Image (spheres, rainbow, N blue to C red):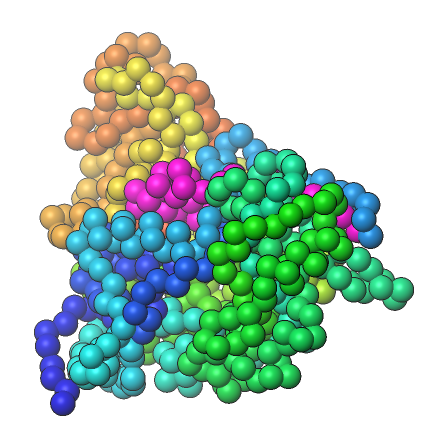
Amino acid sequence: MAHTRTTPDVLIVGAGPVGLSAAVELTRLGVGCRLVDRLPARLPYAKAVGIQPRTLEIWDRTGLARAVVEAAVPLCGQLIYVDGREQARIELELPPDIPYGFAALPQNETERLLEEHLASLGAAIERGTELLSFTQDEDGVSTRLRSASGAEEELRVRYLIGCDGAHSAVRKGLGLAFEGGAFPEEYMLADVEADWDLPHGYGLRSIRLADDGSTDDLLVCIPLPGTGRYRMSMLVPPELSTRAAATAAGPGAGDGVEHGLEGGLEGGRVPTLAHIQAVVDRLAPRPATLSRMRWSSVFRISHRIVDRYRGGRVFVAGDAAHIHPPTGAQGMNTGVQDACNLAWKLALVLREAAGPALLASYDAERRPVGEEVVGRTVRHARQGRDSDPDDPRTRLLREAQLLLDYRDGPLAGSPYGPHGAPRPGDRAPDCAGLRLPLTAYPLRLLDVLRGRTGHVVLLYGADATALAGAAGAVREAGAPLFAGGSAGGPALEAIAVLARDSTPGEPGTDGAPGVPDVPCYRDGAGEFARLYGADGPTGFIVRPDGYLGSRFPLADTAAAVSGYLTALSVPEP
């Protein structure tokens, strides 16, 4: 018999990295949410293992990044072999102003760290709880849940987020189109240890070509934390084919979406260590003996994307919205950015600090990203990375997800600033060398922004009096929409950055008082001015997801901040 209980504002379905990231963001922004997952426990599989630098920047603001980098292994590059000969050695070297590198961590460990971080914020996953159905109206979403005991519950929430994977019940309930196709190949995955002496932190891609130039045999190895530990993938032998046996596992089988782990989870045919060893014997650049296989499975790859990321008060994110080849480790990372983009917008709308129309920008900003990622990864999987016309540095930055922007989105506003400088919609660059009078060490901008939950207005200039006036304009312009003191912390803050070439002895220089009533940092290394293209007194609005919302002359602070906030408060048509 169903019962009703008082509920929070948001229900998140699916407790993988995307659902957990959404729950972390919403909880720290002061939004009450419930996170449910049908599985009774976290799966012990190293599925998604690559963590991009941009994802670490996002997790830095929440306070999670340090735990992740301490647990992960750095990805230094990749060795590429063709027909037994080394063809290339790719170095994953980023510019020095990028704070994080590429990392590898088993998905189950990523989920563990996210779950622990969520618990530190006072929230938890409700395991063994399945979404059965939902309906929505103008005021909210009515859902029906079933717990592990079989008891059913009617749950009324303001919004519903589906982070429930490729076979998403939320996506199906919305009736979203999920167009695309599937790759004919099947693959094996295994988490094993190898006793070879490959360079630490380097992945391996070894292929054998057929007479027509197509890939006839394949071995891909990604290093994982631990001595000699790798996540290996390779083509499946005929005897393990799940397509012929039709042993697709898990809910959603028969929905036409052939994506993810199949055999080896719920009665499927499990690759043995001997299957994996046979491929290594054929394709490894040097002899290696495998051991300690933690798990193995057969998996398939599809490429699909929904026609929209939102239907009324219901949203989809991550694999529920887009699936594609694992080339370049884009999937989980793209999903985490989906969650971060949506969370701050939901938080502002629920706090009545923004109009409901803001939620339309989620689809407008994120679906083009999903389309680009799906298209690029499919092209790379079929034609190789060399099919990308851009230079290697640009390809690397794009793969790190550092070139993603929302310049064409509805929140970007008018561009301003010198050519080549970051503009509205771009990632807000990190920079080093920021100094406080009381510290003997420099800080990065990420250090300054860490833990802040709302928009931050960065005010740059050489005149402390002018910066103080601009800070006052921020407080006055933001007062109607951003009255402070809510559970999620201030929704708008001002931070002053005093130019490096300020005259010694002026307020704000090292050892002297700063701008009154706002944090004031000196651009001690000049990196802020260089990376932000600040060739004069300038203001920048940094969104909660780390993208620039606005850029303006310091003298226009009041009008710029008021205009930006007014754009956020537009009611739904």
| Residue 276 drawn at (x, y percent) | 64, 59
Relative to 184, is 286 above or below? above
Q: Which residues are magenta?
A: 53-82
> Quadrant location of the N terminus?
bottom left
| Residue 444 drawn at (x, y percent) | 38, 30
| Residue 460 drawn at (x, y percent) | 36, 31
Is residue 494 in sight in this rendering? yes
Viewer-proximal residue, 226 or 151?
226
Relative to 526, is 313 above or below? below
Residue at the (28%, 9%) spot, across then down: 505
> Quadrant location of the C terminus?
bottom left
**Residue 69, magenta (yes or no):** yes
Quadrant of the image occupied by residue 11: bottom left
| Residue 443 drawn at (x, y percent) | 35, 26
Would residue 15 be found to the left or right of residue 409 on screen? Answer: left
Would residue 244 be found to the left or right of residue 556 on screen? Answer: right
Viewer-proximal residue, 454 or 220?
220
